Amino acid sequence: MRNSISFRLYGNYALFTDPLTKMGGEKYSYHIPTYQALKGIVESIYWKPTLLMVVDKIRVMKPIKMESKGVRPIEYGRGKNTLAHYTYLQDVEYQVQAHFEFNFHRSDLAFDRNEHKHHNILKRALNVGGRRDIFLGTRECQGYVEPCEFGEGTGYYDDYGDIHFGTMVHGLNYPDETGGHHLEVRLWNPLMTNGYIQFIRPEECQLVRQVKEMDVKPFDQDHLESVDELFTQIKGEMRS
């Protein structure tokens, strides 16, 4: 696919928090990244509101290991620290394949739809580790990305068979991506086969719940750098 990228994603720790574990002040990571977390990572590599980033599939390269840490987060109601235990994924590595599509719910950004230039900028951003910092689920878990050929190398779960992870959060529906007027949460039941997880598209999720009403943030040419301007700027930097 011409508008796709494949990259290696890795870090010392990750925390893709299961929201059911947050009610008591604790945090426990899902065993695998959520679609939304991976989408956020792709958007940290390169993103504009003109684009919809779609995560196609992921390959788990290292064994799933957990580590619990005692932390002292601030209890804002009292202004003091409290004690909690966060359970992180340890020593993670994934291969991710994703692509972008144009967001046709943003007719105000039709002037910015240049697939070739967006893809070139995306690939260049990936080569330098992303335009913004990469986080593995949360701010304290620094991640790193680099280009790779999806499927290359040997993974820990290559001959493991099927692993079911139960019901998980898939991601969030924002009004500017759906054309609606609500923030919604999506759920799904992922299956890993020999280390590979094929993500269903957001519109294919059957379990969707409204969270709250939300409006679309408007953009126009006066408040958004066009891809043509950005591409020209990057070409100038490369020459210098």
Image (spheres, rainbow, N blue to C red):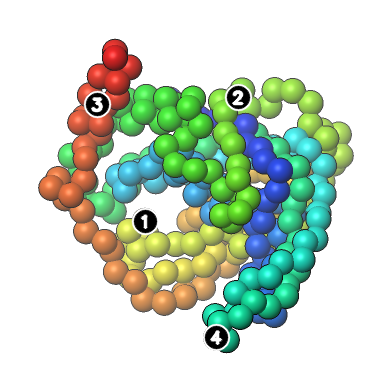
Rounded to the nearest angstrom, the CA distance separating label 2 from label 4 is: 46 Å
Tags 4 and 1 in contact by the CB under 8 Å rule? no
Tags 3 and 4 in contact by the CB under 8 Å rule? no
Task: Mark 3 or mark 2: name the one nearer the start of the chain.
Answer: 2
Judge left or right: residue 16 versus residue 41.
right
Instruction: Return the residue at label 1.
Output: 177
Expressed as whole percent of the image width and height from the top left, the position of residue 214 reads 34, 71
Element type where label 4 sits in the image:
loop
Name which quarter of the figure residue 234 lies in: top left
Work out whether residue 63 can be spotted.
yes
Expressed as whole percent of the image width and height from the top left, the position of residue 38 reads 56, 47
Task: Mark 4 or mark 1: name the one nearer the start of the chain.
Answer: 4
Instruction: Return the residue at label 2.
Output: 148
Name which quarter of the figure residue 197 lies in: top right
Instruction: Return the residue at label 3.
Output: 233
Rounded to the nearest angstrom, the CA distance separating label 4 from label 1 is: 35 Å
Quarter that holds the C terminus: top left
Work out whether residue 35 can be spotted.
no
Judge left or right: residue 220 versus residue 81.
left
Instruction: Return the residue at label 4.
Output: 77
Task: Mark 2 or mark 4: name the one nearer the start of the chain.
Answer: 4
